[in-house]
Amino acid sequence: MAIILNDAGNHRHLLPLTFTRPVGQLRPGILRLGEGWYVRSGLAVGYRTEPYLAASFPIPEGGPQLEVDASLYPSDALVSAVLDLRPGQVLVHAGRALAFALESPSAPAPSDWATVPPYLNAVSFSGDVIRFERPWHLFQCCGQAIAQDFALLTEGRRSQRMSAQNTIIGDPDLIFLEEGAVVEASILNTKGGPIYIGKDAEVMEGCIIRGPMVLGDHAQLKMGAKIYGPSVFGPECRVGGEVNNSVILGYSNKGHDGFLGNSVLGEWCNLGADTNNSNLKNTYGPVKVHSYANGGDVDTGLTFCGLIMGDHAKSGINTMFNTGTVVGVAANVFGGGFPPKHIPSFAWGGANGLETYDVERALVTARRVMGRRNVPLDALDEAVLRHVFASTRS
């Protein structure tokens, strides 16, 4: 048996983050969504996503399959309910399908998620449901994901010892250091939630952290960083300056002073020194952001919403991002003034205009950047980036 995480019509709504990954590869907490399903269920996990991503994220072959909405957070209660499904049943919450137990290898139709087929046996799920259907949902709901992932991964385990030169405010049992993690001369406050430091990660001297917060494997908090939770920094990230309620999926750098707030960054991004983003309009009104699915701006309903940035995007020093800015894949933003609030993938420039960033040059840069973390840019990665370039060229 396997769990298939189906994008279920959410892929375009989560762009630019999902240009380079299925919905189930997003990281709202310590784990990616797919990793959460695997750890809690013990079953193989596959992805039903866009055709150009299928080679990189395949579906396991053979055996019965449980088809699950990939945007759902895999809480213990939800995973248990999905595993209890029998062939011909569909798990339903508030009139929407959460998961199907399939009797045949065919996948649910896109419309089946919103309107449950009458020929299936509906099973009601009464527990809490956490969905990640828009990019800003990641920073909105990451606190809940951190708390549940922390409980899952630390139960029955002992944290590595932390230096006595640190100051702890709140419950010290809500701080967990994996093997090789180092924290020195910093202040850690767990009154708002747990603090998880991954394998071989480092919190340098003078950092101030308010949980909930995740620092992934081999990641670093640079000296004097000020972190307001809930925030997630995936593996190999380099983070400095001031960060408030933000998610960085992994392998990205915000290594210098500057503010990042209520934001989501993909992988392999780099924010130049003193890059800042606005997360609040001067009118204190709701923030609108560009939606690829809608073809224009949509109202987030949020007072605080900052920067949404796709993989391999970068900003030059002193870049200023306006409230609710969306930056596509492999964009390179620089120059004085505020750049546009929507910067397409493979765009080069800023407030004074945008040009197309040649895909060959972008691939050379990506290969260098990934090589610095000893990760190769393989043929599948290159094919995905070429597809994104071609599909967004207009």
Image: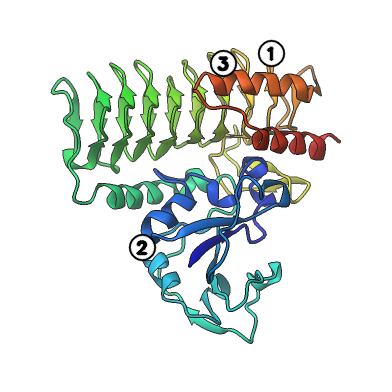
Q: Please name the amino acid that badge 2 sits on.
A: Asp
Q: Depth check: give the residue in front, 19 or 291.
A: 19
Where's residue 340, x and y in %? 73, 28
Quickly name the residue at label 2.
76
* Residue drawn at the location 65% of the way across and 69% of the way down: 107
Where's residue 24, x and y in %? 54, 52
**Residue 349 visible within the image:** no
* Residue drawn at the location 60% of the way across and 42% of the way down: 285
Q: Is residue 66 left or right of residue 196?
A: right
Residue contact at pointers 2 and 3, CB within 8 angstroms = no
Quickly name the residue at label 3.
272
CA distance for labels 2 and 3: 40 Å
> Mark 1 vs mark 3: which is more N-terminal?
3
CA distance for labels 1 and 3: 13 Å
How many other residues sit within 10 Å of disc 3, few (<14), some (14-19) or many (≥20)? many
Q: Depth check: give the residue in front, 60 or 41.
A: 60
Where's residue 179, x and y in %? 25, 32
**Label of residue 336 in the image:** 1
Is residue 194 depicted above or below 81 in this figure?
above
Where's residue 311, x and y in %? 62, 32
Q: Secondary structure at mark 1?
A: loop
* Residue drawn at the location 62% of the way across and 17% of the way down: 319
> Mark 2 vs mark 3: which is more N-terminal?
2
Q: Secondary structure at mark 2?
A: helix
CA distance for labels 2 and 1: 48 Å
Q: Is residue 262 left or right of residue 218?
A: right
Q: Is residue 13 left or right of residue 255?
A: right
**Residue 68 visible within the image:** yes
Figure coloring: rainbow
